[in-house]
Amino acid sequence: MFEVDLLIVGAGPAGLCAALEAGQEGLSVLLVDENAKPGGQLFKQIHKFFGSEMHKAGTRGFRIGENLVREIAECPNITLWLNSVVFSAIDQNHFEVVHNCSVQVINTKKVIVATGAIEKGLVFPGWTLPGVMGAGALQTMININRVRPGNKLLMVGSGNVGLIVSYQFLQAGGESVILVEAANRIGGYGVHASKIRRYGTNIITGCSVESVSGNGKVESAILAKVDDKFQTIKGTQWEEKVDIVAIAAGLYPLMELLRQLGCEFTMCPPLGGWVPVHDERMETSLNGIFIAGDVSGAEEASTAMEEGRLAAWSVTYDLAKCTKNKYESVRIDITKRLEALRSGPYGIARKNAKDSIYAIAKNFSKLR
Amino acid sequence: MEENLKTCGVISSDEFKNCKGWPSEERFSKGPVAILECIEEIPCNPCECSCPKGAIYVGHPITNLPTLDESKCVGCKSCIASCPGLAIFVEDHTFSDKEALVSFPFEFIPYPKKGEKVSAVNRKSEVVCPAVVHDIYCTKSNDATMIVTLRVDKEYVHQVRSCKMLGD
């Protein structure tokens, strides 16, 4: 039996920041990730981040990851287990982990689940052909594995992921990009769209992919204009020769462990679908089970890092490892920074969605 | 459908009217100056901190559009690589009678070389004119974002926003 103050599941931006804050405050932390390397999606983010100077804006994502991983290694209170899977929750304090080819039982006082999110698929004739993949998968191939799986990309979806990965595909030496968006407006930041347009990307709004075909791999796609209900407008179909189709249709929280634990969920489309109910302190409907990052609603790395810090401070306070005054002042600072990241026309829907989840959590707090 | 930033990724002339980072023609005539092509209220402010002259203001909330104080800007290009959106450019209309300089961020390899002849492209990737690479450099803080300066016919300087990728 491995005993710790805090078990953190997932060593992405949220988990790493949570571990650092808690470790530096003197909690014994076990940080577990199923991947061979920590950092989650940070290491494939080769672009400079938006945000404030405080959020390391203007810094490339993988550099933020490098710094966090170095700080984690320097903190004696943090144990990092890689290639390890938290596969079962016995109860709120006991978890089973496959580590070094054996099952370890963890006895922990508190838990932060920071398991992130997974890409949504899109189903159309030909979607199982090799060459059709998630935009995040394409990003991993070109930026982590340095393999460009094709030359002519069809990107489906114009959120920031679709726009950024299109740009990175061109940086990786891709020949051409066609980007289609079913809505009549580009979903992500205009500056990202300008970037790819400047280098030849054809951005088509009000358009979707109808089917993909090819002999054993993607060779062409049929595109069609769609109406405001996303229904194909008859007679508008045309064919484009492409060899990669990437789907950037959003993300949804990865919450199997929270399901096992019996957390309450609520349907929240702006944050990806079903999300765990949680309060402003990042605690779920279950006492001592906290969440942070995309698992609490798909957003982006900067908010994930702040939520990780916030969850860690809530745990620290609940374990009586810091004063109420200290906790309150840190909590207010982080909350202000989160509000800044959720402001403006792109942030307000996420801010309102979070507020509605916090409101639901108030009822659970009473039950708890 | 109207072509603008949200339908095709190119800022329309109407949208440029709301841009607080576009210098006056009078200012352009006096020497190099930055252009902040940022018209959406996104939470972002590295440009403000990058300016050694305090010529860029975002303030609070950080979703404010950046405002350029054209009297303070000296066109030093420090801001160009700070913008995660690659939306800052510097134009110098005083280079010579016929030619102007335009500087932009560039993140594709191979990099063009100083003195090389390239094709200057506009916001839609259309070739607008031939150009010569007047300068190209990268500082450590730019973190691999090259700052390319092209020498172009004055007539086209407001249109030129990059050069064709050399891999093409």
Image (cartoon, grey):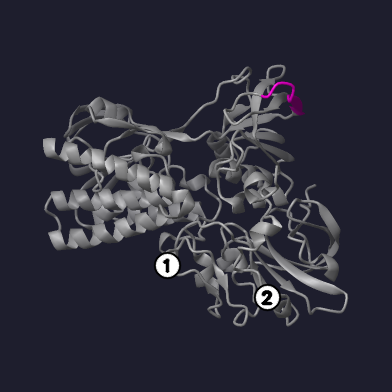
**Residue A30 painted magenta:** no
Rendered residue at 35%/54% (across/down):
A338
Q: Which mark is residue B60?
A: 1
Q: Is residue B110 above or below residue A219?
A: below
Rendered residue at 63%/60% (across/down):
B87
Rendered location of residue A301, percent (x, y): 43, 48
State the quadrant of the N terminus of chain B.
top right
**Residue A235 painted magenta:** yes
**Mark 1 burial class by Cα count in 10 Å: few <14, some 14-19, many 20+:** few
Main SS category, magenta section: loop
Q: Quadrant of residue A128?
A: top right
Q: Which residues are magenta?
A: A233-240
Report helix, strand or loop for mark 2.
Answer: strand
Q: Which residue is mark 2?
A: B33
Q: Is residue A81 above or below residue A56?
A: above
Q: Is residue B63 above or below residue A359?
A: below
Task: Tell me which chain the residue with mark 1 is part of.
Answer: B
> Horizontal placement of A306 versus A154: left or right?
left
> Horizontal placement of A123 versus A343: left or right?
right
Rendered location of residue A358, percent (x, y): 26, 43
Which comes before the other along the chain, label 1 or label 2?
Answer: 2
